[in-house]
Amino acid sequence: MKKAAALLLALFVAVAVFISCIYIGENLNHHCYGEDCTICMELRTAEAIISNTGMIIAVMTSVISFLIFKVCKPVQKQTKLVGRSLISLKVELLV
């Protein structure tokens, strides 16, 4: 249930960013009619959505990187891979 909720939330954020980018692209060169222009307010809101989502992505990338270096590195050190190859086993190949 939690995975489905997380996936739905991630999908919602991705759609919000995508729609904001489309809206900014379509209304970038609109004719502003004054101080209380609704299109300008909506453009600022779309820019805020993109910038806030970018900050979230940066934080999540930092957290994931930290977890990879702190959790996966010790696990890799604990597992010892035995390097076996045909040369180490002194196998002679016949041609």
Image (tube, helix red, strand yellow):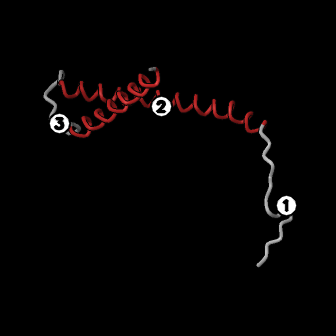
- Horizontal placement of 7 versus 81: left or right? left
> In which quarter of the view is residue 95 placed?
bottom right
- Say which of 63 and 35 sits in front: 63
- Horizontal placement of 30 versus 9: left or right? left
Instruction: Give the residue number, with chain letter if any, for mark 3.
Output: 30
x, y percent for residue 92: 83, 71
Q: CA distance from mark 2 to mark 1?
A: 48 Å
Instruction: Give the residue number, with chain letter if any, for mark 2.
Output: 57
Q: Residue furthest front?
A: 94
Q: CA distance from mark 2 to mark 3?
A: 30 Å
Name the amino acid, label 2.
Ile
Q: Residue furthest bottom?
A: 95
Instruction: Give the residue number, with chain letter if any, for mark 1.
Output: 89
x, y percent for residue 30: 17, 36
Labels 2 and 1: the sequence-earlier one: 2
Who's the residue at 80% across and 42% down the image? 80
Q: Circle 2 — which element?
A: helix
Instruction: Choose mark 2 or mark 3, whichever is in front.
Output: 2
Name the amino acid, label 3.
His
In this view, 12 is above or below 18: above
**Mark 2 surroundings within 10 Å by alpha-carbon count, few (fewer than 14), some (14 through 19), many (20 or more):** few
- Horizontal placement of 63 versus 56: left or right? right
Q: Are marks 3 and 1 in contact (CB under 8 Å)?
A: no
Labels 3 and 1: the sequence-earlier one: 3
Labels 2 and 3: the sequence-earlier one: 3
Q: Circle 1 — which element?
A: loop
In this view, 63 is above or below 25: above
Name the amino acid, label 1.
Leu
x, y percent for residue 67: 63, 30
Q: Are marks 2 and 1 in contact (CB under 8 Å)?
A: no
Who's the residue at 69% across and 30% down the image? 70
> In which quarter of the view is residue 44 placed?
top left
